[in-house]
């Protein structure tokens, strides 16, 4: 008899409970409740840069809220056991005949998870010369101005604001301003 390869499936979970679902499945795997038919469980995440009161913070965010990826061989009672895990709503693709995720999609998701460098986070902010911005951090917080220069390497802007009726250039970080 030929060896049957396991496939990736998507479990729908209550949003915010993905971690608990993963924990439960991993515990069951450790106790061999699935007879070795469940191989991996993943919650796809991505790193994002967020503003906080005292600077920028790198946080991990769920790429697919409400979904948990499971690599499994759905034989016997395995599908039934996975469906009956607390906080699981069912399989994506239907309860009776769960459809596996294509290899291309899994590779894309796993590739995205691998592309999470600690340092070189891309700041997805598109500033251009002439844009109107409002300063939201630092001593000039609340002032509005116009971008005169953008330095993507240093992630800084030169913004001209009016102080006492005169235009004053300020060097600010991308995270210190927001578009108006």
Image (cartoon, helix red, strand yellow):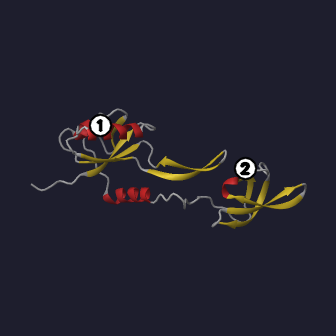
Image location (x, y in percent) of residue 93? 32, 45
For the image, the number of numbered tags is 2
Tell me where residue 166 sits by quadrant. Answer: bottom right
SS at mark 1 in the image: helix
99, 145: nearer the viewer: 145
**Disc nearest the viewer among 1 and 2:** 2
Does residue 77 sit above or below 51 in this rendering? above
147, 91: nearer the viewer: 147
Image location (x, y in percent) of residue 103? 31, 58
Does residue 83 sit above or below 124 in this rendering? above
Taking the view exactly as shown, the residue that stands out farthest to the right is 165
Report the residue at 45% width, 44% height from top: 65
Q: Tell me if mark 2 has few (under 14), some (14-19) or many (20+) residues whose alpha carbon lies within 10 angstroms of its own.
A: some
Can you tell which mark lies on residue 83? 1
Does residue 149 sit above or below 43 in this rendering? below
The answer to whether residue 105 is seen in the rendering is: yes
- Mark 1 or mark 2: which comes first in sequence? 1
Image location (x, y in percent) of residue 143? 80, 51
Report the residue at 41% width, 40% height from top: 19
Q: Tell me if mark 1 has few (under 14), some (14-19) or many (20+) residues whose alpha carbon lies within 10 angstroms of its own.
A: some
The answer to whether residue 70 is seen in the rendering is: no
State the quadrant of the N terminus. Answer: bottom left
Image location (x, y in percent) of residue 150? 69, 66
Report the residue at 69% width, 58% height from top: 173
Left or right, 39 with reference to 3: right
Find the distance from the CA under tag 1 to the CA under tag 2. 48 Å
Can you tell which mark lies on residue 141? none
Q: Are marks 1 and 2 in contact (CB under 8 Å)?
A: no
Report the residue at 22% width, 48% height from top: 73
Can you tell which mark lies on residue 137? 2
Tell me where residue 125 sits by quadrant. Answer: bottom right
SS at mark 2 in the image: loop
């Amino acid at each position: 008899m030929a060896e049957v390869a396991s496939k990736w499936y998507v479990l729908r979970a209550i949003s915010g409970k993905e971690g608990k679902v993963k924990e439960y499945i991993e515990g069951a795997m450790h106790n061999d409740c699935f007879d070795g038919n469940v191989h991996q469980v993943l919650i796809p995440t991505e790193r994002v840069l967020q503003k906080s009161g005292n600077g920028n913070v790198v946080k991990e965010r769920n790429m697919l809220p409400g979904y948990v990826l499971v690599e499994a061989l759905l034989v016997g009672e395995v599908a039934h056991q996975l469906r009956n895990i607390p906080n699981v709503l069912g399989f994506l693709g239907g309860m009776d005949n769960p459809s596996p995720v294509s290899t291309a999609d899994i590779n894309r998701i796993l590739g995205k998870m691998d592309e999470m460098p600690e340092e070189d986070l891309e700041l997805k902010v598109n500033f251009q010369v002439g844009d109107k911005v409002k300063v939201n951090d630092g001593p000039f917080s609340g002032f509005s101005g116009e971008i005169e220069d953008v330095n993507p390497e240093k992630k800084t802007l030169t913004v001209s604001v009016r102080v006492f009726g005169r235009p004053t250039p300020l060097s600010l970080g991308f995270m210190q301003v927001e578009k108006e």
